[in-house]
Amino acid sequence: MSLIVQKYGGSSVADAESIKRVAKRIIDTKRGGNEVVVAVSAMGDTTDDLIDLAHEVAPMPDPREFDMLVTTGERVSMALLAMAIKGLGYDARSYTGSQAGMITDSKHGDARIVDVTPVRVREALDDGAIAIVAGFQGFNRDSRDITTLGRGGSDTTAVALAAALDADVCEIYSDVDGVFTADPRIVPKARKLDHITSEEMLELAANGAKVLHIRAVEYARRQGVTLHVRSSFSTNPGTVVYNPDREEEFTVEEPMIAGVAHDLSQAKITIVGVPDVPGKAAEIFSLVADQGANVDMIVQNVSSATSGTTDISFTLPQQVSARVAQALETHRDEIGYASLAHDDQIGKVSLVGSGMRTNIGVSARLFEALRDAGINMDMISTSEIRISIVVRADLVAEVANAIHTAFELDGEDEAVVYAGTGR
Amino acid sequence: MSLIVQKYGGSSVADAESIKRVAKRIIDTKRGGNEVVVAVSAMGDTTDDLIDLAHEVAPMPDPREFDMLVTTGERVSMALLAMAIKGLGYDARSYTGSQAGMITDSKHGDARIVDVTPVRVREALDDGAIAIVAGFQGFNRDSRDITTLGRGGSDTTAVALAAALDADVCEIYSDVDGVFTADPRIVPKARKLDHITSEEMLELAANGAKVLHIRAVEYARRQGVTLHVRSSFSTNPGTVVYNPDREEEFTVEEPMIAGVAHDLSQAKITIVGVPDVPGKAAEIFSLVADQGANVDMIVQNVSSATSGTTDISFTLPQQVSARVAQALETHRDEIGYASLAHDDQIGKVSLVGSGMRTNIGVSARLFEALRDAGINMDMISTSEIRISIVVRADLVAEVANAIHTAFELDGEDEAVVYAGTGR
């Protein structure tokens, strides 16, 4: 008998009908002779509605009360889901984050899991019942207060339960069929991957792929949990995200390249004429860090021998880029640079694949493809299994498609595109 | 420094604006130099909406899951209320039923409070904070499951907290100004009472007055909690419901009659020609009890010497009356009665007043009033401080007004009538 943890996003439990449909699906899994634990998100837009209410009553809602408020969304969906299952004649019990033993630190709004003690969940399974757990939420033992896990929280709940219960697989259900070689919305010929290494999945998620939250992937990789990303709207197999320990099962037919990710949420700042003396970079980036900006790519030109100055470019999230540019302007004289350029009309396209390690010439092939397409790159950065380039925002789709074709990732027919994905 | 427990019904926290208004009111009480504990109901129709959802996913929702579901309503309102208070610069902390130590038995949907251990509420007060507690809900220690207290649950939560914290007063806020000498919706000249004994309040509540739930009044009387029923839409003093131990403070001007209550939710069953032999009544009412019917009034005519039979009439809730009539029909032969009449077009009007004990001729005065109004009574029953009569439903308003006038309860001007009252 296998133990399967399933996670259903908000779009999969948006209304009573969807909840009943998901209930049937859970029962099918149970009838397949498995033990089933389900982590569920709040119904559709419930959480957003609660957040709006909070801001109506208080400009800056208290974090503790905010968590108490937003966690009600998952409590509603988990209770309804358990009712629906019981209504169909199968035993089910719902548990809040604290009842399920999701122990976290006390950082309200973005708490980290410190321990998972799913005693009651285990009891329910031993009684032959299906356990439904509220996603996204936890409990701090010291303050005895309810906490939330931040973005992608329900995925993390599912992975944490799968790890603690030593589940055979953690199925992440949303409204997309799985992990694609690229975002079908901009690359029509994107193919669904049957499997991908957790390492590649991490790079894709970190570089703009939205299907899985990076935190859940990290947790799964660290805990050796195998993920299965699939759609709750079809019974098609999705994409298996596996860890190094299971590589022999899959590597047989492992492709060199996993996929192409794109990210339009970054901006670029270029500082021209920075004195090429030790400590300048440190001076600049400590200033950037003070603004709470998370820098992604950094490129420094070769110093010009004549002027003794260099240019430094880096990318950072658009939300903070204006603030950072302002701070740099303010310290212009003490840093001693010539001019500053701030551009938020950029996009990043990344090619990801474990095969890069053993295959030489990947970057050469990539640059040829861009040359043939007449694309001019702004920045380049590489990791062991990834090559990322920054181009003008309006070129991102063209670049992604060109690379996708160059590396023979194109599928036969166009991929189906869905509305959006649940939390 | 006084400790004041306040309860706000659903209509008082129906939307963000109302919540902010209530928050200001709570802060005013706090600034008055008091410790404040608040029990709050779910916003407006939230609970009904959740109940509808439950029935959409399952015809007969599981009781445990149902309680888990509906208790989210109070969690939302308590968190929003705490946020609103903090937003105005005062410390506030919200607590769920279990966090507030509302320990109940395990009867889901109608749990009884077995212990109240408001340790965290007390801690909050000691820290100078306002404590907000989710009404209507509790926690069963053995099953570690969430329970609900049934109808009027939030009033009961407030009273239970007031008793456990030895509060000076428990203020019950709704959208009516207090307890009236009659329902202003049918007796325009009804007056608001400044105070009333808990004993009289119990009789009024038991006989149709809706302003307070009888269970909360019983709890307050048993625990010696003084209630103050008032409106959250005005600052007028409401009605104080006091216990025997405080009678000397009020009896000075205690009126003979407290008020007139009416009840249109009952039906009447009359069994004609019942053999007047010992044990028949027992036979009939055990049958009625088997149907889960709660009998209110019972009247047995004097036996007719010639036939050796008697007629028995009794009132019971309309929801069950048809079922009971059916059961009696089925056992007609073994009971051996002649015929049965079932009438759900009746109403009960009750006159309540502690003064009845010491004032003779109250019933005579009542019957004169009805005679003068040309009203024919179906049934009469009396308690130490109450006289109830049953009349045709369409006569209830006329009867209530006639009695109200006859006992000089009429006020100068017409009372304001509000929409309805929150849970």
Image: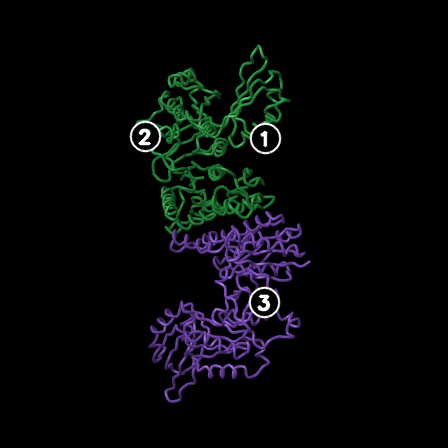
Chain colours: A purple, B green
Circle 1 or circle 2, nearest the eye: 1
Q: Which residue is mark 2?
A: B414
Q: In this picture, is B111 found above or below A122?
A: above
Q: Is residue B353 above or below residue B61?
A: above
Q: CA distance from mark 3 to mark 1?
A: 58 Å
Decide which of A386, B229 is in the foreground and name it. Answer: A386
Are callouts 2 and 3 both on one chain? Answer: no
Residue B364: assigned label: none
Q: Evaluate if marks 2 and 3 touch, with contact meaning CB atoms under 8 Å apart.
A: no
Q: What's the mark number on residue A239? A: 3
Kindly check if marks 1 and 2 are in contact, taking CB atoms under 8 A apart as contact: no
Label 1 sits on residue: B291
Residue at 38%, 33% in the rendered image: B178
For discs 2 and 3, the disc positioned in front in the rendered view: 3
The kind of residue on which mark 2 rests is: Glu
Do marks 1 and 2 share a chain? yes
Left or right of residue A99: residue B166: left
- Percent across and percent down for residue B351 are 43, 23
Q: What residue lies at 48% left-to-right and 57% top-to-bottom?
A: A108
Q: Position of residue B213 (x, y in %)?
A: 47, 34
**Chain under disc 3:** A
Q: Is residue B58 visible?
A: yes
| A263 relative to A44, above or below | below
In three-dimensional space, the C-alpha distance between marks 2 and 3, rounded to whole angstroms, equals 72 Å
